[in-house]
Image (spheres, rainbow, N blue to C red):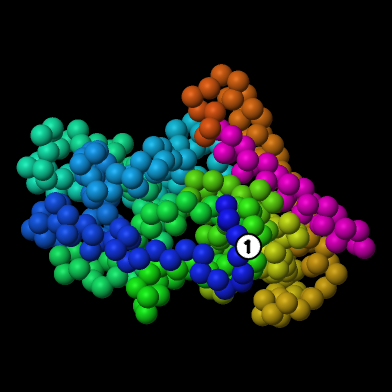
Amino acid sequence: MSKASLQEGQVIISLPESCLLTTATVIRSSVGPYIKKWKPPVSPLLALCTFLVSEKHAGRQSLWKPYLDILPTSYTCPVCLEPEVLDLLPPPLKAKAEEQRARVQDLFASSAGFFSTLQPLFAESVDSVFSYRAFLWAWCTVNTRAVYLRAKRQECLSAEPDTCALAPFLDLLNHSPHVQVKAAFNEQTRCYEVRPASRCRKHQEVLICYGPHDNQRLLLEYGFVSSRNPHACVPVSGETLAKCLLPSADKQVHKKIAILKDHGFTGNLTFGWDGPSWRLLTALKLLCLEAECFASWKKVLLGEVISDTNEKMSLGMAQRICSDFMEETQAALRKVSDMKKGKVPLLRQLSLVEALRMEELGILQASAEILNSLLAPF
């Protein structure tokens, strides 16, 4: 909360370089010599995770204790969700969450040899210090709280981009999709600075924007959902489009899907608060092209109207997809409601899924109304 009114462009936080937790910090620490010796080189991400686990275990002996004490003890990113809760996520998000979990598990498993070399630093077994639970906490800390900072490459680390820095105090600022800020490292002052793009009243919470992300992205990367998010949308996968047409008597269906793939129309297809996106409707118009109009597919991708029949068919298909999505979302919400009655330990995780699903149901209902009005003239 601000103690004074803040003006547009005013520096609200200036964090000195020495306060940023970077790979340079890690290399200067007690784990640094072990990182330098290990081959093949560890990644910048693994270096940061290793440091966090080590410092967290050090407790009062750690210079970073004041910062570590304010970090969450657990996270609500999908990678941390229980399998039965993960099953309640929308299919596209569930697939991404499973990919993310596999990457984290692979990184942990492949790092066992490196962790074992750190045994001289600990009185306890290194396996108990670097448990999967401790590693997952460290990974989530970096993934949810790091700021972008392109660092000078450390020769002892792998060639992967070294762009993450933890910023104590600064990372306490909450997200709002309705504000804009400029946040970057100032090479002149050697400080990481945050400047609001709008005014902030005295005694008002100071908010920043983590980026123009939809709620599925916010949940995947940060572990929360933003209500009435203007960037919120419900994605439609290329597989969903294909299912709408198969089985089909349309002999050109495979050609149509190939055209959509070749021209990048199988991704970023969404329902939003303002209805189906232009990209989604365009993809559906091409899929609904009648045989005699197929030669006009390039005109469809350019946004031209081919015929009333094509317009009606594509809107009707969008309506069916929207209806199917609403049914699936409502079924998931019923499951969440039932589980909340008997799964008290999972209440926090279930409430998060419920918030996401409720937001998406609102978007689908808004899109359904818009589609009804668009179909009315036909």
**182 left or right of 141 in image:** right
Report if residue 369 lies within the magenta region. Answer: yes
- Residue 44's quadrant in the figure? bottom left
Residue 19 visible? The answer is: yes
List x then y, in percent, for residue 129.
Answer: 20, 36
**157 left or right of 298 in image:** left
Please state the extent of the stretch shown in magenta in the rendering: 350-378
List x then y, in percent, for residue 69.
Answer: 35, 41
Q: How many marks?
A: 1
Amino acid marked by disc 1: Ser
**87 left or right of 202 in image:** left
List x then y, in percent, for residue 348.
Answer: 53, 32
- Residue 176's quadrant in the figure? bottom right
- Which one is nearer the viewer's eye here, 229 or 109? 229
Residue at the location (83% across, 73% down)? 307
List x then y, in percent, for residue 223.
Answer: 49, 46
Report if residue 218 lies within the magenta region. Answer: no
Mark 1 — residue? 5
